Image (tube, grey):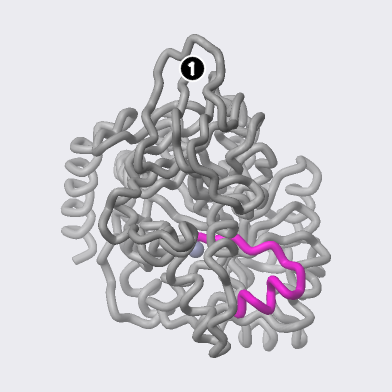
Amino acid sequence: MSILFSDFTILTPGGDVQEHAFVGILGDRITYVGQEAPEGDWQRIIDGKDKLLMPGFCNSHAHSPMTLMRGYGENLILQEWLRTRIFPFEDKLYPEAVYYATLLAMAESFRYGIVSTSDMYFFSDDMVKAYLSSGAKANVARSLAGFDEDEDMYGMTSFKEAKRLFEEYNGAEDGRIKVDMSLHMEETSTEKLARQLAEYSRDIGARMQVHISESESEHEGCKKRHEGRTPVAYLNDLGLFDSPTTAAHCVWVEEEDRAILREKGVTVASCPVSNLKLASGVADIPALMEAGVAVALGTDSVASNNSLNFIEEMKFFALVNKERRRDPTLITPREAFYAATRAGALGQGRTDCGLLEEGCKADLTVLDLKAPGMHPTFDLYSNLVYSASGSDVTLTMIDGKMVYEDGEYLTIDVERAVHETEKARVEISAQVG
Ligand SMILES: [Zn+2]
């Protein structure tokens, strides 16, 4: 398929806004970006009047099947929320429920311009099935947890699932599907498990996803459990960051932690909305950036967000960080946009994603610029981060394939996904009370 985006406003890799640009797509790649209409026999030409074409968003930390728990368990502290609501509900999950909930999450993602998701959960086969059928791009990870100090990882069912998933799907669909390894977090794992997984991941060349220092109790508890070492220091000692790692949250990390994160090339997936809702705290993103740590953006689960609206996520990301240090000069709209796109793609090991540039994968989003709230335009980046709504997205394309356009979900039967997810919600609710 060849598509020409004709006469669009675009956001260039250098952070500039360019008007009257032409962008050609051939197969899954961007093959032309320029001010002149390119020669060629385009199968489709899309008119760009009053429209912005930009790289799609990369959701660097999510648990997509938890879409099923949107609005379930509100106004509770993190530990109580997990213990009394989330874990009992998750205990009753079944493959079909996970499949449709993931599909629903992908529909919502496309609607808000998300093209790629780092996804950590279980029932991974059903998640992969949903990415395959919907055309979504994902780094999926079967998360490992364990509390028995003597248990050997290689005998764990969850590990076997992660291993098989990696062997079966890593790199599938021309790299659209990647399989990462995942340690759930320090608090929910033993030293032996963390060490064994770190070794295994390094040996097979996988990437790593992990939760780090989300809550103060987790961070301080880790220091008590491990001779004063923070989660970053402890997991680094066990070799976890020898694999390219995405660490979600990092709200409570300390100065020495930031040096380790930078040295190990860890990408921090900041999840400001989830952190605010669970009152976990606000990560000191400017300090991480000043220390040279790569910072990307994630929604975390819809159970703690309760949305995949990525424009909203960018806005919160900028605002909470200004307030945290009482400094309005911090986190510019361009920095927020970079965290939401290119930084996330790099964290997923996708060097050819997250930029509107010739040779890159055609992972694109179109935003309506006609909306009254998008005018006047002094700086388009400011309008994008602070004024736009997620619903201003009109088109989302992944690997050159249209997945959402003008209210239509082109790869997902969204009514079915809604119906089946509601059905699963009723069924599971009846069991957990
Ligand atoms: Zn999470």
151 vs 124: above or below: below
Residue that appears at 79% across and 48% down: 202
Residue that appears at 35% across and 59% down: 388
Which of the two residues, 39 or 101, is positioned nearer the viewer here? 39
Identify residue for label 1: 2
Which of the two residues, 349 or 321, is positioned nearer the viewer here? 321
**Secondary-structure class at tag 1:** strand
Left or right for 40, reference 94: right
Residue 338 at x, y = what percent? 59, 57
Q: Which residues are magenta?
A: 284-298
Question: Does 285 appear in magenta?
Answer: yes
Residue 383 at x, y = what percent? 41, 61
Question: Does 57 appear in magenta?
Answer: no
Question: Would you call the spot at circle 1 few (<14 residues within 10 Å), some (14-19), or many (20 or more)?
Answer: some
Residue 238 at x, y = what percent? 79, 65
Residue that appears at 53% across and 30% down: 23
Residue that appears at 31% across and 34% down: 405
Corner quadrant of residue 45: top left
Most extreme residue toward the top is 41
Residue 211 appears in the rendering: yes
